Image: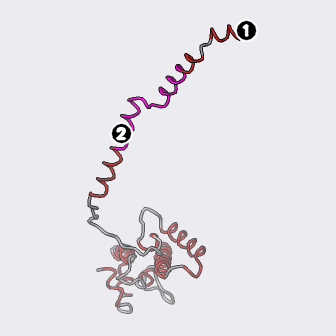
Amino acid sequence: MSNQIYQEVFNVQWVRQELEKLVKVENSPADLTKLLSFLAILGFLGFAFLSFNTPEKTPNVVVTTSPSIPEICAKRDFNISLDRTIQQLQELERKQGDQFPEKCGTQLNELRLIQQAVGLAANNFVANVPGREGAFEILCKIPPTSDNFKEAQSWAKRWHNDKAWKLDIERALPDNPDCQKLIE
């Protein structure tokens, strides 16, 4: 008897029809989904087309530095103090050891010369110092082709324009003719 009630309440054929309707609804994507998918594909294709057909613009200024030479060695950053730049170069030298680029070594040596010269000038040993090199003579060791020459030149001109040191610098010039470039 219970089977008979069950069969009457749950019509198997009707249940199958309802299940098939649900499966069809779940398996078919909604119109909004179709539209959004189409727009996404269209957007991707448009972007791909534009990126391949747009010519690359080359910058007006091209800076060429060797990938093996760190930026600190290629150009002096005047936003960083002289002492801090020297410290950074020394750390780099310690880390790289034998791989320390020659350009970095030159930069470090020239910055040390400037640091030494500024220190001597602070103690009034600018030029024509008996028995030792003065700050001016030390700056003469930096070649005019160096990136650091302008900084050396600015210090030398500053001292040359100072009444207290002008005579000493002019007395030192005959012994150091290459130093003339520093005060020109």
Q: Is residue 124 visible?
A: no
- Name the residue type under label 2: Phe
On screen, residue 159 above or below 3: below
Query: Is 158 left or right of 7, judged from the image as shown?
Result: left
Which residue lies at the image location 37% right of the left edge and 83% below the top edge?
169
- Secondary structure, mark 2, is helix
**Place of residue 59 in the rendered image (x, y in percent of width and height, measured from the top left):** 28, 64
Q: Earlier in the sequence, mark 2 or mark 1?
A: 1
Q: Of 134 and 139, which appears nearest the observer?
A: 139
Kindly indicate the quadrant of the structure image that contains residue 147: bottom left
Q: Of 147 and 52, which appears nearest the observer?
A: 52
Report the magenta stretch's main SS: helix
Quadrant of the image for the C terminus? bottom left
**Place of residue 41 in the rendered image (x, y in percent of width and height, measured from the top left):** 36, 44
**Place of residue 33 in the rendered image (x, y in percent of width and height, measured from the top left):** 41, 33
Kindly indicate the quadrant of the structure image that contains residue 58: bottom left
Which residue lies at the image location 54% right of the left edge and 69% below the top edge?
88
* Numbered label attached to residue 38: 2
Mark 2 vs 1: CB contact within 8 A = no
- Name the residue type under label 1: Ser
Query: Is 3 left or right of 8, judged from the image as shown?
Result: right
Which class describes the residues within 10 Å of circle 2: few (<14), some (14-19), or many (20+)?
few
Task: Tell me which segment is drawn in magenta.
Answer: 17-41
Quadrant of the image for the N terminus? top right
Q: Of 68 and 36, which appears nearest the observer?
A: 36
Kindly indicate the quadrant of the structure image that contains residue 135: bottom left
Query: Is 73 left or right of 8, judged from the image as shown?
Result: left
Q: Of 152 and 4, which appears nearest the observer?
A: 4
Which residue lies at the image location 35% right of the left edge and 79% below the top edge?
166
Which residue lies at the image location 51% right of the left edge and 68% below the top edge?
83
Q: Is residue 40 visible?
A: yes
The residue where tag 1 is placed is 2
